[in-house]
Amino acid sequence: MFDYVAWIAILVCCYAMIAISLNIQSGGAGMINLGQVAFVGIGGYSVAIFSRAGMGVWAGLLAGVVIAAGAGYLLGRLGRTLGGVYWAIATLAVAELLRLIISNTDTVTGGMQGLGDVAPLWGELHGTANTLARLAMALAFLAAVVLAAVHLDRSQLGRSLRIIRENEPLAAALGIDVVSAKSRVLALSGAAAALAGGFHASDISFVGPDQLLPFQTFLALTMVVIGGLGRIAGAVVGAVIVEAIYDGTRYFRDFLDLASDQIAALRILLVGAILLGFLLLRPKGIIADHPRRVRV
Amino acid sequence: MRLFRRHPATLFLLSSAVVLSLAAGCATTDATDSAQARPPTTPLPSANPALSGTITIGAVLPLTGANATVGTDQQRGIELAVAKINAGNGVLGKKLAVAVEDSQGQTTATIDAARKLVAVSTVPVVIGEYASGNTIPMQQFLQQSSVVGINVGSSSIELRGTGAMQFSTIGLDDKAGEFSANALYDKGFRKVAMLAPNNAYGSGIARSVADAFTGKGGQVVASELYTEGQPNYRQELARLANADPDVYVVTTYGRDGAAINAEMYELAMTSKPVFDIYMSQDVPDSDAKAVEGRTGMDVKSSVGGSEYETYYRQTYGEGFMTSFSGFAYDAVFLAALAIEKAGAPDAGKVAAAVPDVAVSYQGVTGPLAVGPDGQRLAQPYTLGTVRDGRIEFP
Amino acid sequence: MITQQPPELIADALVRGSTIALLAAGLTLVYGTMRFANVAHVEFATVGAYATISLSGVFIVPVAGIIGVVVAVALGAAMYELLFRRLLVMGEMPAMIGSLAVSVVVQAVIQLAYGSRPRDVPHELEQVSTVLGADLTPSQVQLVAVSVSALVLTGALLRWTPLGRKVRAVAANAELARVSGVGERRVVATVWAIAGGLAAISGIELALESSATPALGFNLLLPVFSAAIVGGLGSVLGAVIASYGVALLEAIVLALDFGGSAIPVSYRPAIGFVFLLLALIFRPRGLLGAKVRIV
């Protein structure tokens, strides 16, 4: 039983990392990225490919983080001043394109069936030691991402991003290099998401294209909205709540007499309804962003 | 939009239209289900009252999703086996129970289900799944968790390498590929066009057939792997038709199978011979006109007339839904006998006992003896033809 | 070299393009007049399809189809009143995210009610007939005919009726139109009804030609948005041209044969995506989009 609770806790850590990575883009800079799952996938597949090629999971993790950061930066550069709707659709298209390519390339990415037999990051442990090691590592990664996000929040870049979020033309008028700022935050965001993806691939020892569906980004987005745009603690709280609902209701079947795909639909319905509820009733989320104190 | 508040009548009419269509939708499903009257069925044999306590093993099956028909049939095989075992001596004096989880046909859900069975229900054996793309990662996970896995529906040759505690009751694709290629060559075909789903199963079988067929001197003029779950497959079929083969070799299942078969008919491709690999996966769901006269192959347990078939028919009031219930049935017996031989529901001991038990157990799908890689050594196949929507075996 | 004849390519493009065009036209119209990027727009198609399929047991198909359209539009109106209007007050992006949530909820409800397996209107198997050099089934011919008629009607409405002129005025400049007393509420209702109606028709025709799944609409989301953006958000004509254009491009690319091997059919959506991304990089305002626009 402890194993199962630990498993949920680890999932929460992964999702929290992804939620934070999304938050620094949207809460930080006002960019709604509907394709965030692409970065997660880059991390996951890097780890899997490196592991199976015998080059080591840690090398794969590092490669994934670097590639995702690079991809994020490039995305920022290519996107230039795309915002709002255009940015959302463009990022969604990029993520779907990646998923299509992965699904259809049998040789390197395993195509539709994915890649299994991914070695764990913590070496060959068994039983409770294994579970504890996984949990410890998940928490460590989460802590790293949180620290990075806090650091970003307090830095010059963070301030620039908040101005961009509130009023982009003003930011440009103030002399902020908008494109550069966006690119840098995307690089950081990509790295964080890839870290989560790589860890998760190693954790379940499998990575496949159905982990790259837009619904995953939707879950992360819900966490961010519930938690409150711009607040790191909010992203973590959002992750806990959404994961609790989404995975906790997996066993509805034991209580309700519905077919499994109906249970699946019910869980998705819950998450969507909650997102709508928060948007309409409490758009600032549970932990809303507060005006920063200005030290004069 | 304010007109809604001013005209509640309109609002009422529109909402009743919505409710009406939803209700009509649900109503039509019920109607079609009860439309076919079933012959009377016999209840399953009741459990031996001398048994006390329960030993639980697990199963992960696609009860929903594209392969729900096969998953349901696999579940039937399990039910039949459990009832029979419990009516007899049970396992180690206890009743056998199989905890069945739904894989929904998705890989991550399959692994989650397996994880739940292993962590929460602590089973020593997990039976399943159906799609190779799900069974392979599941068995890899089971191996890492030191739990025995028995594959009952997948046939990808990659299952040879999933681990020492992983077994199969169904023969793998290299044998099916060889059998099919031989059959095609013997019928005089020299140019084939293949269609299979884009997953571990499809790409594996396409490769097996292609290798075996070209080895005999034939030619594969076209080979398409289709992405599952699309509304139509005209593009893929058009490519096959353009290659001008002697025969179309298809292997499909579920709703995709029904759609593809219908489209082949619509595009007049059925004027050429069609050879269907694992016929019982798609023919039962398809329109009879579309599949009339096609030939194909299947695993031998789908041939009726045996004691198992009678048992199945008496319990469910109809003949085999697919050819896969027998493999699940055999897997339950294999697991039960292995636990009995091992003396305890301990995964390590059970794994050691399986090969010994398999040699002496004559399954309903044929001899179950396994080789050193845990895979079945002999898999009987048979050719068949479709007449009036039903598969006829010689 | 190209393995298919021009008539076949054009036929493919017409069938696929019509489905996308009906949806893209409505989407771009809604965005133009209300600045609302409605991700749930494609769900009109799904709802219309399922309503028609359910009712086809009770009514004959054409009648079921009409009621299906009504149901979809009614649902859309209700959603606008209850949800979208409030979200739009908050801004363009909250509305878009909200519409994404609505889309997810609608799909979930449909899956809850109907299950995830495809549903179709039971029909006799048809056979293709050769029309002007291309093989088409009767359903496909119907799809194209109905779609093109609907688009032409809509175009006529927008161009030649007073209401249509008002719609175009609002689409060009909502503030100015409001100030000059164009009657924005009526325009919004009209636009919403047209967009919903066209989308529902698209979904119904698609379901009749193949089958309906809960993801029927969502699978078309990206191609539809791509067409709308490439055509220039706000321009119905642009959206329609872009839809058929991308469909033709898809047909051509898939018919290419590189000496024995071809691009896997599964890559079809990728062609549209690449086109979209190139357009966004080099010409974000689209084919016929307005020149002054903060993108």
Image (cartoon, coloured by chain):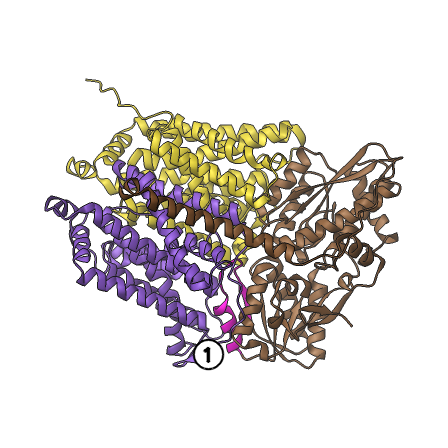
Identity of the residue furthest to the top in this view: A296
Instruction: From the rendered image, report the letter of the chain displayed in purple.
Output: C
Kind of element beneath mark 1: strand
Q: Chain of mark 1?
A: C
Q: Estimate the x, y position of residue B229 in percent, counting from the top left.
A: 52, 57
Seen as rendered, the residue at the extreme left is C180
Q: Residue at x 71, y 47 (%)?
A: B163
Q: Which chain is yellow?
A: A
Residue at mark 1: C129
Whether residue B168 is visible to the viewer of this picture, yes or no, is no
Check the picture and name the quadrant holding the N terminus of chain A.
top right
Q: Colour of chain B?
A: brown
Q: Is residue A291 above or below residue C128?
A: above
Answer with the quarter of the image where residue A288 lies: top left
Tell me, yes or no, whether the highlighted magenta stretch contains residue B233.
yes
Side of C242 relative to A96 (left or right): left
- The residue lying toward the viewer, choosing from B6 and B95, is B6
Query: Callout 1: few (<14), some (14-19), or many (20+) C-alpha neighbours within 10 Å?
Result: some
Bounds of the magenta segment: B223-243
Quarter of the rendering containing residue B274: bottom right
Q: Nearer the viewer, residue B83 or A195?
A: B83
Is A85 within the magenta? Answer: no
Tell me where residue B273 appears, x and y as whole percent.
Answer: 63, 78
**Measured from the top left, where is residue B386 in percent x and y?**
69, 71
Q: Please identify the quarter of the rendering in which residue B114 is found.
A: top right
Q: Amino acid at mark 1?
A: Ser
What number of labels is visible? 1
Is residue A173 visible in this depiction of the protein? Answer: yes
